[in-house]
């Protein structure tokens, strides 16, 4: 497994442990603090890329488009459940690099894996939060769609097996396998929106660590200290 797959296991275990020891109010406080720290550090570490992007007309227009959509959703008072869900699902899918393979057929196979993962993660998100987002009948339809999406995912992975390594295959479906276990658990224990948000911010706090480690001990130590200081301030 890749380092990111181990991170996912650590994050899920951390959320389970915190949920067992605290209530939703404390989880909300931790998630809010980690969210503030995450966005602050994103600006700090992306300032060079942001400045470079704004110097190009094409990327400036794209950024303005994204901001316009965000503003429109705010004005329309779009539910945070939906806004975060879209953000979370796309991040989870594109966080994993399933590889790049020469040949149009191979690229199509990888594309099918990404599409199936988007479907699976999106429908799992909806189903886990069905008590606040969906009616009983709609929940049943989402469950059927989710099972069909899982079939599509594993069929796509099998088709791509000749040019994917074992590690890439594990990375391409580990989250989805773990998510299915959460679906089963959700029938006997409520999984809350705050738990999903907390998982999201924990994994994005850990995500830069391998890259920082490659840059050297100083870069790694600086990131860890900044993260800890920002989190402590937010709390």
Image (cartoon, helix red, strand yellow):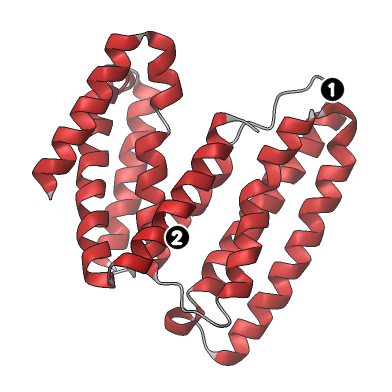
Q: Is residue 47 visible?
A: no
In the image shown, does 170 or 59 lie closer to the viewer? 170
Name which quarter of the figure residue 211 lies in: top left
Q: What residue is at 45 percent from the left and 22 percent from the top?
A: 210
Which residue in the structure is indicated by mark 2?
A: 85
**x and y, in percent, of residue 134 in the image:** 50, 83
In the image shown, does 168 or 119 lie closer to the viewer? 168
Which residue in the structure is indicated by mark 1?
A: 103
Q: Residue furthest left?
A: 233
Name which quarter of the figure residue 145 lies in: bottom right
Relative horizontal placement of residue 54, taking residue 40 as reference (left or right): right
Q: What residue is at 29 percent from the left and 24 percent from the top?
A: 46
Quadrant for the N terminus, please: top right
**x and y, in percent, of residue 68 in the image:** 30, 48
Q: What residue is at 78 percent from the left and 32 percent from the top?
A: 166
Mark 1 lies on a secondary structure that is: loop
Q: Is residue 169 above or below residue 222?
A: below
Name which quarter of the figure residue 203 lies in: top left
- Report if the CB atoms under discs 2 and 1 are less than 8 Å apart: no
**x and y, in percent, of residue 230 in the image:** 15, 37
Mark 2 and mark 1: Cα distance apart in space:
33 Å
**x and y, in percent, of residue 30 in the image:** 23, 55
In the image shown, does 201 or 71 lie closer to the viewer? 201
Q: Earlier in the sequence, mark 2 or mark 1?
A: 2
Q: What residue is at 60 percent from the left and 83 percent from the top?
A: 139
- Give the crowd class for mark 2: few <14, some 14-19, many >=20 residues within 10 Å: some
Q: Is residue 145 visible?
A: yes
């Amino acid at each position: 497994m890749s380092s990111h797959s181990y991170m996912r296991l650590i994050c899920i275990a951390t959320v389970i442990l915190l949920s067992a020891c605290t209530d939703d109010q404390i989880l909300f406080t931790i998630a809010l603090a980690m969210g503030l720290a995450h966005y602050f550090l994103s600006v700090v570490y992306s300032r060079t890329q942001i400045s470079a992007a704004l110097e190009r007309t094409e990327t400036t227009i794209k950024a303005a488009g994204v901001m316009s959509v965000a503003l429109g959703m705010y004005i329309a008072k779009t539910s945070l459940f939906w806004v975060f869900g879209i953000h979370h699902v796309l991040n989870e899918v594109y966080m994993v690099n399933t590889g790049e393979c020469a040949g149009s057929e191979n690229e199509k196979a990888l594309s099918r894996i990404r599409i199936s993962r988007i479907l699976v993660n999106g429908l799992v998100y909806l189903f886990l939060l069905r008590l606040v987002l969906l009616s009983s009948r709609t929940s049943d339809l989402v469950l059927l769609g989710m099972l069909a999406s899982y079939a599509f995912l594993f069929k796509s992975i099998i088709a791509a097996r000749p040019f994917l390594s074992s590690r890439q295959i594990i990375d391409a479906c580990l989250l989805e396998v773990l998510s299915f276990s959460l679906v089963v658990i959700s029938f006997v224990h409520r999984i809350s929106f705050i738990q999903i948000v907390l998982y999201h911010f924990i994994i994005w706090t850990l995500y830069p660590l391998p890259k920082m480690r490659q840059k050297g001990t100083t870069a790694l130590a600086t990131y860890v200290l900044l993260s800890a200081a920002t989190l402590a301030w937010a709390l």
